[in-house]
Amino acid sequence: MKYAFYVFTSYGVAGVMTLCLIAWVWLDGRARRQELAELEASGFRRRSSRPAPETPDEMGGETTA
């Protein structure tokens, strides 16, 4: 029983640290989504949201006609 305090304290500290990391990642994700929404509202767009080019001219290639 003399090691019980050490074991329980270690598990407690590890649990608290894990919960803090989860909260930090969750809060940071919310902040990044809010920043992204503000940028999109001001006119900036993600490159991945553009439609894909459909013709070789739009892709920058040469036509073989």
Image (cartoon, rainbow, N blue to C red):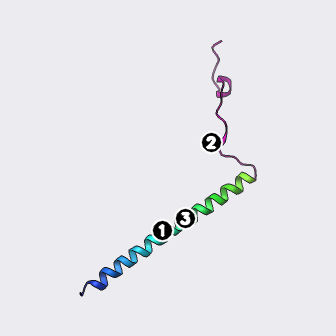
Q: Which residues are magenta?
A: 42-65
Farthest residue, direction right: 42
Give whichever of discs 1 and 2 has the lower sequence position.
Answer: 1
Q: Quadrant of residue 65?
A: top right
Magenta-drawn stretch contains 55: yes
Determine the CA span between mark 3 and mark 2: 24 Å
Horizontally, residue 41 falls left or right of residue 12, namely right
Q: Quadrant of residue 3?
A: bottom left
Residue designated by label 3? 26
The crowding category of the residue bearing disc 2, from other C-alpha atoms within 10 Å (few below 14, some 14 to 19, many at least 20), is: few
Helix, strand or loop at disc 1? Answer: helix
Residue designated by label 1? 21
Q: Tell me the residue at 38%/78% (across/down).
A: 12
Check contact, mark 1 vs mark 3: CB within 8 A.
Answer: no
Find residue 23 and report its horizontal and vertical position in percent: 52, 69
Residue designated by label 2? 48
